[in-house]
Amino acid sequence: MLTIEEAQARILDDVPRVRSEDVPIDQAYGRWLAEPLVALDSLPPWDNSSMDGYAVRAADLAGASADNPVSLTLLETIGAGSWPSQAVRSGTASAAMTGAPMPQGADCIVMIEDTDGAREGAVQVRVAPHVGQHIRPAGDDVKKGTTVIARGTRLGPMQIGLASALGYGRLAVARRPRVVILSTGDEVVPPGRPLAPGQIWSSNNASLIGLAREAGVEVIDGGIVPDTFEATVKALRDAVGLGVDAVITTGGVSVGEFDYVKDAIAGLGGRVEFWKVKMKPGKPLAFGRVGKVPLFGLPGNPVSCIVNFLQFVRPWLLACMGASRSFLPVVDAIAGEDLREKPGRFSLMRVRLTSKDGRFVATSAGNPSSGAMLSMSRAHGFALFADTSTGAKAGDAVRVQLIDASFMDGYGPDYGW
Ligand code: AMP
Ligand code: MG
């Protein structure tokens, strides 16, 4: 049986890269940047005022104070969005609002609050400023020619904001891979429909569709396939026929009497590259190909299929999109209680996290069964235990793979803000 690392290496070997496409920047959210983003100009592009105030020459105001204000002749008012028409000479000043370009000759800004305001074409200044004060110099934020976002970075609101500030109306991003997600099982019924005896509602369609969308890919819901060889072959053939980048199935990959996914791959002339991974949950993963299309046969147990998606499918999808990092982040934590585990397989234990005294603290999220959705829904991450591990004792160091960082929300006041 393959280890989790071996299975990941097999899956991530030779991943086909999707082509890139140019999209309007308002559609770039959550996409992966396909080319390095280079600043074509500096930011800010010219020296400008960071305060509502007056652009002056510091030397004129060397002796100014509240008791001894200095009067300067006012030339003009420069608002943000206008351009200065006059140079500031000795004995003069121009009003310059926040964001206004600096006029020639001026070397600093005094705040409106440090003056008596403008009266009869002059302004009384009550402070002695220093050169450069309240000026945002050209290129202070970004220098022209700098690569500001590396290729393979996921574009979130801040990256899109930066690209916008640099004038990009469109961005080159990886095309979204398209995947089909389908469940197998005679017992499985879409939620909202009545159940016959022995039937259950499908959770896997919904959770996998959500996970795939979060990964930034386009999803086709292939619905639910009955447990027959013929139906499974037809569903996989139809899915592959859609020209998708990958097919994801759940259920029907164990050793049960109605588990047809592996046979169906073979029946379509495809091959199963490996089956079963030495991990818990998620052992009966099958990975194969029909033609060139990879097929991820995830187990039916709701938590197993989520775990397998996150460890194998998500990295594959991200690699397709050229992501520079394709695995979930792992943080060091302390076990907040005994986290017992049976050795034998690499284990991913659902845990909740808190933050205390500068450290993450992990406690069990509840029922470790591979079918237990409540503990899955409450977990912030997976504590990772090697196949030889018996778990962690309270106070031991544990590594936790993060799946949900919302536990960090609301910590502000605890830090004394
Ligand atoms: P299987 O891998 O098909 O043997 O299924 C393993 C377990 O997962 C069984 O208890 C199934 O009823 C359950 N299961 C399979 N598919 C789904 C699904 N789409 N949603 C929820 N549970 C499922
Ligand atoms: Mg089944």
Image (spheres, helix red, strand yellow):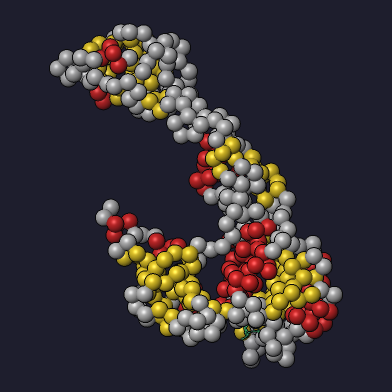
User: Which residue is drawn at the image coordinates 49% and 73% (left, top)?
Assistant: 384
Q: Is residue 354 above or below residue 140?
A: below
Name the side, left or right, on which 101 lies relative to 27: left
Asked whether residue 353 is in view, the answer is: yes
Name the side, left or right, on which 122 lies relative to 383: left
Asked whether residue 220 is in view, the answer is: no
Q: Is residue 143 above or below residue 122?
A: below
Residue 188 in the image: state x and y as whole percent.
66, 82
**Total numbered labels:** 0
User: Which residue is drawn at the image coordinates 81% and 78% (left, top)?
Assistant: 266
Residue 370 quadrant: bottom right
User: Which residue is drawn at the image coordinates 85% and 75% (left, top)?
Assistant: 269
Residue 127 in the image: state x and y as whole percent.
23, 20
Q: Quadrant of the N terminus?
A: bottom right
User: Which residue is drawn at the image coordinates 39% and 71% (left, top)?
Assistant: 397
Q: Nearer the viewer, residue 276 or 246?
A: 276
Name the side, left or right, on which 220 lies relative to 27: right
**Taking the image as four quarters, which one is ligand 1 found in?**
bottom right
